[in-house]
Image: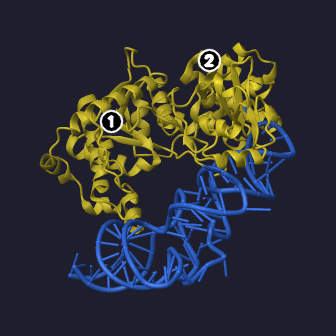
Amino acid sequence: MNGLLDIYRERDLLKDATEGADEHLAEASRTVYIGFDPTASSLHLGSLVPIMGLMHAQRSGHTPIALVGGGTGLIGDPSGRTAERQLLTKEKAAENAEGIRAQLEHYLDFEVSTNPAMMRNNLDWLGNLTFVDFLRDIGKHFSVNQMLAKESVKRRIEGDDGISYTEFSYALLQSYDFLELYRRDGCTVQMGGSDQWGNITTGTDLVRRVGGGKAYGAVFPLITNASGTKFGKSEGSNVWLDPERTSPFRFYQYWINVEDADVVRYLKFFTLLSMAEIAELEDAVEREPHRRAAQKALAEDVTRRLHGESGLSGAQRATRALFSGDIEGLQADEVAEVFADVPSSEIAAEELGGEGASLVDLLVSSGLASSKGDARRSIEGGGVYVNGVRADSVETRVTMNETIDGRFVLLRKGKKSYHLVAVRR
RNA sequence: GGUGGGGUACCGAAGCGGUCAAACGGGGCAGACUGUAAAUCUGCUGGCAUAGCCUUCGGAGGUUCGAAUCCUCCCCCCACCA
C-alpha cells in the first residue's frame, strides 16, 4: 500500500516526518491537521503547499482539518512593532475564517460523506483558557531545558534579536492545539512548513504525555526560487488566492512567468498531474524551452483549480490579446472584455478635452507610478506605452484622440504592467 | 540597576562640521538581448513647479555662517554583568 508520505516523497513535498508516521498513515484512514494564520481574509501562495498537502491527504482517504489560529494569531510575532497591536476581534477572526474556508473549498471537499474536510478555530479553546489553568495543565509538561534546545529557540537566543516570552510560549499554545484536536476529533497527525518542525514535535510530545496517545508529524520543504527571490511574490506584493486581491489574470501570469529552473518542481508541488505527465513536460522544457509548454500547463492547472474554467479562459483571452495580438485592432467592447481583469480607473471625459491630461498625471493616478518623478523617469527610460505605442516625451498629453472609440485609454509600464483608464461621460 | 556598543534612505552598511539627497552592496523599477525565462549589460531608485526649491540621517532642544556629523536631555535596541 502506498502511504501518503510516499506520495509526498514522489513529489518532493516531504522534508521530514516523525518516527512511525509512514506506517501510521499507510495503515488506515487518519485525521490530519495543518494550521493557517487568519490575519487576513485571504490566503496567499505561501499557504499553497500546505493546502496541497491537505488535498493529497484527503484524496488518499484521510480526513483533513484546517485549523485557523484565531487565538494564536493574536499574539503572533510581537517584534518590530511600534504601533499598538490591533487584536483581532472574535467577529473579525470568524469572518477571516469564513473567507479562508471559501478558498479551501476549491481544494478540499467539505461535503463528501466518508472523510469530509473540517475547519477548526483555536479561539474556541484558547479564548477561555486562563493562565493558571494553562500553567497547571500544559506548562507543567514542558521542560524549559528541552525548549531551549529547540533549533528555532536556540537560533534566536544565540542571535542578536533575542526572543520574547510571548514567542517563547508560542510552541506551547500550538502544542495545546494539537492536544485539543486529538481529543475532539481524533486527530493524530500535524503537518506544516519545515519552520514548524519544532512546534510540531513539541505537540506530538504533549499528546503522548497528556493525551496518552501516539501522535505524528510531517513537514513540507520551504519553497524557494532558483534565482533566490521570494516565492509567491509578484512585483513585491503577495499573490493572493482571493480574486479581489489578485485577479485571475495576474494569478495566471504569475505561473506563466515561472522560470525554467523552477517549473518542474512547481508542477510536482502545485498540480495533480501524474509523474509521467510531468516527466513529459520536463522533457519539453529541455527540448523546446521557447514554447514554455510546462509553464502553460502549470498556469492552466493551478488557475483552473482556484478560479474555475471561466476564470482561466478570461485570463487566457487577456493574455493572448496582450502578448500576441495587437490591441490597436480591438473594438472597444473587446477591450472591455479582455481587460476586465486588469486594474482600471475612471477619468472624466472633460479632462481629456482640449489639451487633454498629462501622461505623467495619469501614470500617478493609475498607480503605475508612485510619484510624478517616478512617472517621468519611467517615460525617460522608454518604459511607458499609451495604447501600445511608446511615449517619447514627458510632455506627452492624452486627449480624446488617443482613446479607443472614445471609451478607453490603455496604459502600460514595462512589459507586464497594464492599466485601463475608462472615460466617464 | 551597572558597564559597554548601537539607532542613517525598502534592507544591510559607509559617512563623523561644509564638496551629503548622503559612498557601496542587496532588493525594486525600466531599457537592451530573449522565450512574457534565466544569466548578462545599461539607466533610474525622497518629493515637487526638475539647470531651482522643499523635506530627510531615533526624538526634542542647543552651539555654529553652516550639523547625519559637536553639546544637552529624552526614547528605543543589543551584549555582558547584577
Report which residue position mark 1 lands on: A188
Q: Quadrant of residue A337?
A: top right
Query: Image check: A111 left or right of A184?
Result: right
> Which residue type does callout 2 highlight?
Arg
Residue B40 spot, x, y in % from top left: 79, 57
User: Which residue appears at 68% of the width and 40% of the height?
Assistant: A360
Q: Nearer the viewer, residue A292 or A82?
A: A82
Q: Quadrant of residue A151?
A: bottom left
Please rate how many residues cluster around mark 1, counting C-alpha atoms within 10 Å: few if below 14, some from 14 to 19, many from 20: many
How far apart are the two marked residues, 2 and 1, measured between alpha carbons?
62 Å
At x 60% / y 16%, what residue is drawn? A309
Q: Which mark is residue A425?
A: 2
Residue density around tag 2, few if under 14, some if 14–19, many if 20 or more, within 10 Å: few
Q: Are marks 2 and 1 in contact (CB under 8 Å)?
A: no
Is residue A61 in sight in this rendering?
yes
Residue A219: horizontal and vertical position, in percent?
Answer: 45, 44
Q: Position of residue A249 (x, y in %)?
A: 63, 27
Chain A display color: yellow
Question: Which kind of residue does numbered mark 1 sit on?
Answer: Thr
Say yes or no: labels 2 and 1 on the same chain. Answer: yes
Please give the chain letter of the residue carrying mark 2: A
Residue situated in front as seen by the camera: A54 or A228: A228
Q: Chain of mark 1?
A: A
User: The C terminus of chain A is located in which quarter?
Assistant: top right
Query: Which shade of the palette goes to chain B?
Result: blue
Q: Secondary structure at mark 2?
A: loop
On the image, the x and y values in percent for residue A170 come to: 30, 50
